[in-house]
Amino acid sequence: MRTLSELLDGAGLPRYRIARAAGMSYSTLLLWERHGIPPKRIDAYTRLAQVLGVDPKELLEIARDTQGVSDA
């Protein structure tokens, strides 16, 4: 399974543009990527999946697997 960082890097766009296109805040995206705190709204996964060109289920799996993971 790919990581969120790999999917974001593969999009070829800056993180802030990905977030904007998905209708979420830049900080929401970074909290998930850097600190393992996924979005709370289920529709965020669908919108982000569309921007990244992946199945929303892949993002839900990533959210489940990374929830609560921290760099600390």
Image: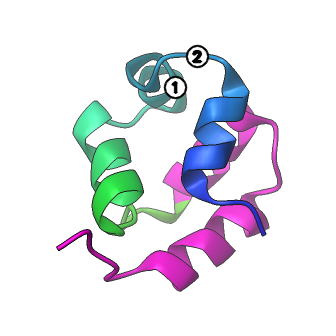
**Residues drawn in magenta:** 43-72
Identify the residue shown where x is 61% and y is 71%. 62
> The residue under label 1 is which amino acid type?
Ile
- Tag 2 near tag 1, CB within 8 Å: yes
Q: Is residue 8 above or below residue 16?
A: below
Q: Which image quarter is the N terminus in? A: bottom right
Foreground residue among 50 and 5: 5
Q: Quadrant of residue 12?
A: top right
> The residue under label 2 is which amino acid type?
Leu
Residue 35 location (% of width, % of height): 28, 64
Q: Which image quarter is the C terminus in? A: bottom left
Q: Is residue 60 above or below residue 4?
A: below
Q: Quadrant of residue 15?
A: top left
Q: Which residue is mark 1?
A: 18
Give the main secondary structure of the magenta stretch: helix
- Distance between mark 2 and mark 1 Cα atoms: 6 Å
Q: Is residue 46 above or below residue 58?
A: above
Apparent side of residue 12 relative to residue 67 in the rendered image (left or right): right
Q: Is residue 64 magenta?
A: yes
Residue 45 location (% of width, % of height): 58, 55
Apparent side of residue 47 relative to residue 49 in the rendered image (left or right): left
Q: Which residue is mark 2?
A: 13
In terms of sequence position, does the residue under pointer 2 or pointer 1 come before the other? Answer: 2
Secondary structure category for the residue under label 2: loop
Determine which of the numbered discs, if any, sits on residue 51 in the image: none
Identify the residue shown where x is 32% and y is 55%. 34
